[in-house]
Amino acid sequence: MTTMAIAKEKAILVGLDRGQQNEYFAKSIEELKLLADTAGANVACQVTQKRDTPDSAFYIGPGKAKEVAVIAEELSADLVIFNDELSPSQIRNLDRVINRKVIDRSALILDIFANRARSREGRLQVELAQMNYLLPRLTGLGNILSRLGGGIGTRGPGETKLEVDRRVIRRRISDLKKEINVIRKQRTLHRQRRSRNRCAVVSLVGYTNAGKSTLLNALTGADLYTEDKVFATLDPATRRGIMEGGREILFTDTVGFIEKLPRQLVTAFKATLEEIEDANLLIHVVDLSHPDYLNHIKTVRKHLKNIDLQAETRELLVFNKIDLLAEKGEIKFLEREFPEAIFISALTGEGMEELRKKTELLLSGAGMRMKIYLPYKEGRLYAMLQERARIDYLEYKSDYLELTVTVERELADKLITFTELPNGSTAAKKDKTDHENQEN
């Protein structure tokens, strides 16, 4: 039996060029085109208008909205995608004029997330974001809801629940939050266990499609799914890696950031973003082959400011995909601008040894390694070490334990008095006698 290919929806892109207020307009429209392509649309036309501020009723001017309606009719377009988030009234007014399915950038990104979420956690979070997006847009949508029968902007776990009233949607939002809170508690327990084992955690962050999953595979030998498309990874993945000195580290791949990331997604994915909050080190992966990589750095750092990072968490800037550069001269410039950065190709392995060494160096402050001699009477302290430290070496002596441990700084202060052999121990007496004999 032959499977028929699903026809792509024909789309028109619409954006406002705000002149000096929006210097990245051309790149933003190009990114919108990439998002539309990822969602499965066939972009037939781009319509832009120069305005200092959006029109309160139509986003674009009412005359421009009529022009878009004519173009949509001539091209037999299925939908019109706007480059910013539209208010409920703007969507309603545009729908009446254009008489086509109207969605905004936020709805488009939510659609991609809905189409790519695979885990139960990911699907719950996407549905919560969809419901929070839909709730204020229910009143008076009229003809719009009748068009939400499928296609881009309506897919995902929540698509069968779109034509319901506010009360039902609020109830569903409440249920989703409860389910996600259970997942958050499970993640908290996992992080507490990792903390007790004193295993350092490194989170890979960056703009979407920067190569984070490929880098995690290179660092850990994992085989995570990778694809040269935006938001290929939605579900966080944690894998163990071994550094040059034999130290075991947990590397976590996280969802990529993007310009104008819908606030509903940021809220819904809080459980996932908490993985970044507890990291000892952030490896900020940058796609050096992308023409707008400097703006990508700013966007990611802007999003990171909204996350409750630990005060001591450090960021290591890693420029990836140097194998795709036709001209290597740009690296020399960036080495002066970002002297602490590392330049790699996660795909070919170039620069990976330097990255591993730098990661090991930056993590050396995440835990203090010390040798101690703990008398057997200090049973309570030993129990604390078992819970809060990593015990690298343990030997039972006649009247004390000889240990090499990796601990956080607070606990290290309590262990200072045990870095010398106990006064009453056999080894200490022998050491004292040998010292006296040498003096005589």
Image (cartoon, rainbow, N blue to C red):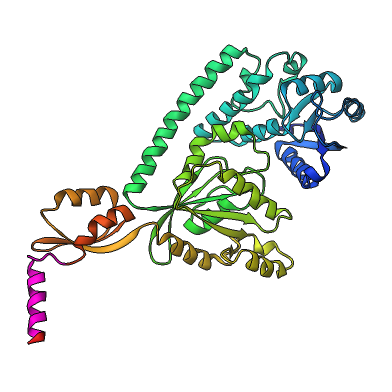
**The N terminus sits in image quarter:** top right
Q: Position of residue 151 (x, y in %)?
A: 72, 27
Instruction: Locate residue 290 relative to residue 19 in the image: left or right.
Output: left
Instruction: Locate residue 76 relative to residue 433 in the image: left or right.
Output: right
| Residue in the foreground of this view, choosing between 177 and 60 | 60
* In the image, residue 141 above or below residue 418: above
Q: Position of residue 210 (x, y in %)?
A: 63, 52
Image quadrant in which you'd find residue 110 = top right
* In the image, residue 283 above or below residue 127: below
Image quadrant in which you'd find residue 10 = top right
Q: Position of residue 439 (x, y in %)?
A: 10, 85
The answer to whether residue 327 is seen in the rendering is: yes
Q: Residue at x 62, y 28 (%)?
A: 156
**Magenta highlight on residue 436:** yes
Q: Residue at x 55, y 36 (%)?
A: 118
Image quadrant in which you'd find residue 96 = top right
**The C terminus sits in image quarter:** bottom left
| Residue in the foreground of this view, choosing between 104 and 86 | 86
Secondary structure, magenta segment, majority class: helix
Give the residues in magenta: 421-438
Q: Residue at x 11, y 75 (%)?
A: 431
Q: Residue at x 23, y 48 (%)?
A: 384
* In the image, residue 89 above or below residue 180: above
The answer to whether residue 390 is seen in the rendering is: no
Q: Position of residue 277 (x, y in %)?
A: 47, 44
The number of numbered badges drawn on the structure is 0
**Magenta highlight on residue 383:** no
